[in-house]
Amino acid sequence: MTDALVAGLITGNSYALIALGLSLIFGVADLINFAHGSVFAIGAMTGWWLAVERGLPLPAVLAGAIVVTGLLGLLIDWLAVRPLAGAPPISPLLSTVAVGLILDRASELIFSPETRRFPSQLPTHNLALGGIRFGTLDLAILLVSLASMSALWLFLRRTRLGWAVRATAQDRDAARQMGVDVARVQGIVFAVASALAGIGGVLIGMYYGNIEPSIGFDVGISGFTAAVLGGLGSLPGAIVGGLLLGVAESFGVTWFGGSARQLVSFAVLILVLWLRPNGLLGAPGTLREPLTGTFFGSGAALRIRPWQIALLLLLAGIALPLVGNDYVLQIAGIVVIFAILALSLTLLAGTAGQISLGQAGVFAIGAYTSALLTTEQGWSFWPALLAAGVVAAILGALTVAPAARLRGHYVAIATLGIGAMVVAVILNWEWLTKGPLGVFGIPAPELFGTMIFAPRDYYLLSAAVLLVCCWLVWRLQGAHLGLAWRGIRDDEIAARSAGVEPSGQKALAFAAGGFISGLAGSLLAHQYTFISPDVFGFQISLLALTIVVLGGMSNIAGAIVGAAILVGAPELFRPLQDVRILAYGLILFLLVRFRPQGMLGR
């Protein structure tokens, strides 16, 4: 037990470094930097390259990681955040999400996605104190973490630039009036925060011994959790939150095995958001404006006339099934499924203004519900399809219950953690979900006694479900419920004063979006005939969000057009396969920067 405590404190120090950076940026820029975990991963990979490929000692490795990640932080602020200074809060948030994806994929292309050994450069388990075994590496990690935190404290308390940072965090406008160069301060904060993340990447890489370019997402979730636990914007809270989370994860691993680490982190994040969203040391009562605000933009939309819609339906419903080969029709079926998934976000993000970064979790619930009912319980496809939607709606509304009470950045954090937790539960709940082995042998749908095997028939089936979902979203948007959702999206305080109860309306929006996501998940499971947890990663959530932003967040036709462009085109052009995820990030980044209302939005 003592060993678990020591291990937890060591890991917690590294989490505290990440949380400190997140809280610094949040305090100065009023922004959750979703690229912070990716910066951590870049720091770890830079440290590995310097230690292994260049053979440099630990001080030089740390210095190199600090320089690279610090410059990267400046670049993120300059390219992704500063140009959106006057935009609604969703714009820089989505911009950092896109940058994180770009960094992760670029790192995989540069270093390759394989796991590699990170040498510790220091002995382990060579010391003992009171029966506790530890190593010089543990002491070095502890000392480096404490030195970094102390240097940050001295910088903020004893230097004029540090005073400017604190003044900007307290009141940007007042600091600007007093002559503080707020833009310069923000850039310095991004550099310092990113350097702290780089140090954390090197320390965690040495401690665990194995790293890969994709480690940023999981560690980023832990950093978010530590920052939220301590209180976003509170630097002492970031340290306390990091230490507490590290200890909790360590004991969880000791008692339940290594797979429990993620579940502990996700559970802590959700419980804190549910019970005390301002954290242990955060300032209470800071309600922020809705994330979407005027994001929908004032630029002219690309108009689709009725005859053009009729022509598209004719091509999709008649011409494509007649002339398309099996491969093209199979891709078209996948496009339709992702268009249905995007429609769920058309309701959530476009109509109700609730930015979900974890829609892949609800998608997975629908897929596994339908797959297990048909393979284990002998259900036919049609009742399983309906059950997938209902179960996804119920569980989706229940799991995001914390988000229904939250506003602004906290909604995005909550949905991100919940989506990842759902996938982690599926991975660990082996007696029901088969864990990493997945569910195979999922039967094909049956219609009037005929099995639907052919890609043409399955495409037509999926297209019919898509039309039903389009009708459902259209009716909900035009109903009184849709008006209430738009009122919450545009101004929650004004909607509350008009008699709209936000929490209940948000829960209904998540339930409606969950039902549509569940239908999409069921269709995916029966088309693939095999599903596993790795099918429903964060990239799926980001893809769905990018589709909606591309087409226009509240536009039904935009979800279909966006899916055709982002899902269909890369599949038809196989040479783009290696850079597809990178392209998603670039498209989202450029859309947020230059056309936030999307192609068909208004």
Image (cartoon, rainbow, N blue to C red):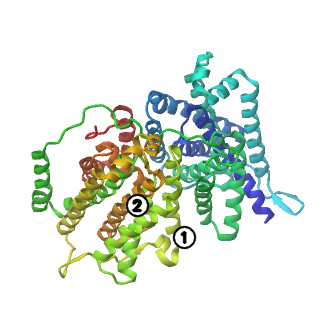
Q: Nearer the viewer, residue 442 or 292?
A: 292
Q: Where is residue 257 in the image (x, y as percent from the top left)?
A: 64, 69
Q: Which mark is residue 511?
A: 2
Q: What element carries label 2?
A: helix
The correct choice, above or below, for 64 with respect to 332 in the image is above
Say whether residue 237 is left or right of residue 496. right
Residue in the picture at 50% in, 43% down: 408
> In the rendered structure, which amino acid carries the disc numbered 1?
Asn
Q: Position of residue 130 (x, y in %)?
A: 90, 61
Q: Where is residue 344 in the image (x, y as percent from the top left)?
A: 35, 55
Say whether residue 91 is left or right of residue 221. left
Say whether residue 474 is left or right of residue 192. left
Residue in the picture at 57% in, 49% down: 220
Q: What is the quadrant of residue 179 in the picture?
A: top right
- Disc tally is 2
The residue carrying pointer 2 sits among few (fewer than 14), some (14 to 19) or many (20 or more) residues within 10 Å by Cα, namely many
